[in-house]
Image (tube, rainbow, N blue to C red):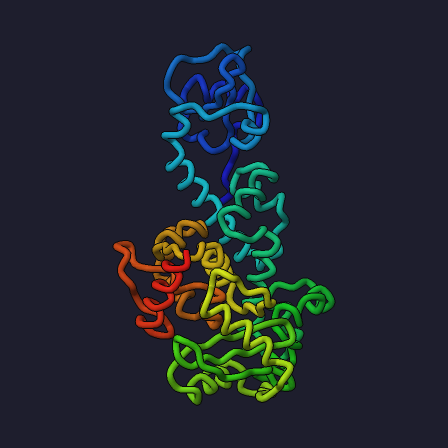
């Protein structure tokens, strides 16, 4: 159901201030010219003179105009953060329900937030713009449809693309290969790989036409190769390529010293939800940890703690997408795709080099 913003004009906003209407919080703020302090509609205290205030669609507008938050506004920050997280979660569901084809104005109107503020808020909380999220959702859906539909064209339309040409503009970049190759389990796609050793044991590095698509850790090289083959059963896996050795060397160096960063392009494949989680993981600084619930809140879906853990477990790019930096609420280590011992080793190494 569409959220109605009843406070679009100054008179309605002033009435909300007079009534200290909590339901208006998050939809606008008002600034007191004499003190250069901005407040939310429900702020307690002395009612300001009507001629001494001005209204803003959001806090950023007030800050840009030179206002600063009042003490009561700071106290309301946690509640407002939860309010905005709920709004962005609603926006994500709306995008998905409309197959990623809803326009920005339409989505903003649905959640009852101004277009500019919504776009900025979505990007800050999700890590992707609404458009990028919609594209990621459609491509994630397409990957599933390609495995189910006999026709590639049917899969494209079922995934929400309005035309073949619109899809093919970014298909290879998103899938790492042509749609035909993806449907055939990577048939015809070339994926270069190499096996090496590092302080964590054996490592397999693989790269598609787009970028590094797998960094797998383990104790059994054959098992690592089998994992790659399971992901792309019909792809042409090419090993022993000398030109690929410099890529492997960079990845090994990154594993041993994560603080140097990885300059190589990544081929990150996953559902829209997984993309949101992985984007959040990549923002965790070296030497720090966060909880699964922290990540769920960051992506605007605080109840999705188990789903966040599932996205971490589905990560094919060890260290590059640092799921090892996610721990339980009490700080203890939980499951890690490549073993708790490796997770502890990575965190210990990062804390030393912090």
Image x and y of residue 113, in percent: 54, 38
* Residue 95 vs residue 297, the one in the foreground: 297
* Res 77 seen here: yes
* Res 147 seen here: no
| Outermost residue to the right | 165
Q: Quadrant of residue 290?
A: bottom left
- Residue 24 drawn above or below residue 283: above
Residue shown at 55% from the left, 61% from the top:
137
Image x and y of residue 133, in percent: 56, 56
Q: In this figure, what is the number of numbered marks?
A: 0
Image x and y of residue 294, in percent: 37, 51
- Residue 227 drawn above or below residue 8: below
Residue shown at 51% from the left, 29% from the top:
28
Report the side of 225 relative to 289 (left or right): right
* Residue 143 vs residue 192, the one in the foreground: 192
Quarter placement of the C terminus: bottom left
Q: Quadrant of residue 9?
A: top right
């Amino acid at each position: 159901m569409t959220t109605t913003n009843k406070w679009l004009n100054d008179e309605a906003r002033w009435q909300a201030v007079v009534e200290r209407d909590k339901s208006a919080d998050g939809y606008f703020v008002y600034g007191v010219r004499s003190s250069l302090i901005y407040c939310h509609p429900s702020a307690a205290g002395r009612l300001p003179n009507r001629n001494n205030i001005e209204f803003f669609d959001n806090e950023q507008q007030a800050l840009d105009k030179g206002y600063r938050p009042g003490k009561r506004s700071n106290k309301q920050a946690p509640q407002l953060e939860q309010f905005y997280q709920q709004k962005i979660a609603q926006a994500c569901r709306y995008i998905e329900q409309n197959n990623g084809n809803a326009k920005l104005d339409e989505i903003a109107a649905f959640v009852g937030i101004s277009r500019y503020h919504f776009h900025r808020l979505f990007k800050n909380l999700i890590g992707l713009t609404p458009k990028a999220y919609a594209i990621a959702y459609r491509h994630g859906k397409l990957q599933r449809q390609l495995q189910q539909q006999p026709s590639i064209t049917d899969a494209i339309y079922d995934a929400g693309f309005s035309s073949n040409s619109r899809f093919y503009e970014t298909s290879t970049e998103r899938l790492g290969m042509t749609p035909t190759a993806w449907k055939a389990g990577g048939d015809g796609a070339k994926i270069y790989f190499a096996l090496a050793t590092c302080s964590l044991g054996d490592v397999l590095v693989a790269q598609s036409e787009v970028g590094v698509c797998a960094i797998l850790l383990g104790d059994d090289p054959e098992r690592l190769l089998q994992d790659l083959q399971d992901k792309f059963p019909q792809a042409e896996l090419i090993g022993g390529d000398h030109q690929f050795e410099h890529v492997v060397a960079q990845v090994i160096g990154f594993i041993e010293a994560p603080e140097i960063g990885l300059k190589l392009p990544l081929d990150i494949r996953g559902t829209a939800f997984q993309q949101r989680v992985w984007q959040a993981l990549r923002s965790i600084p070296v030497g720090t940890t966060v909880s699964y619930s922290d990540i769920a809140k960051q992506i605007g879906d605080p109840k999705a703690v188990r789903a966040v853990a599932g996205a971490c477990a589905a990560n094919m790019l060890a260290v590059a997408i640092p799921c090892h930096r996610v721990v339980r609420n009490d700080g203890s280590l939980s499951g890690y795709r490549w073993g708790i011992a490796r997770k502890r080793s990575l965190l210990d190494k990062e804390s030393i080099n912090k």
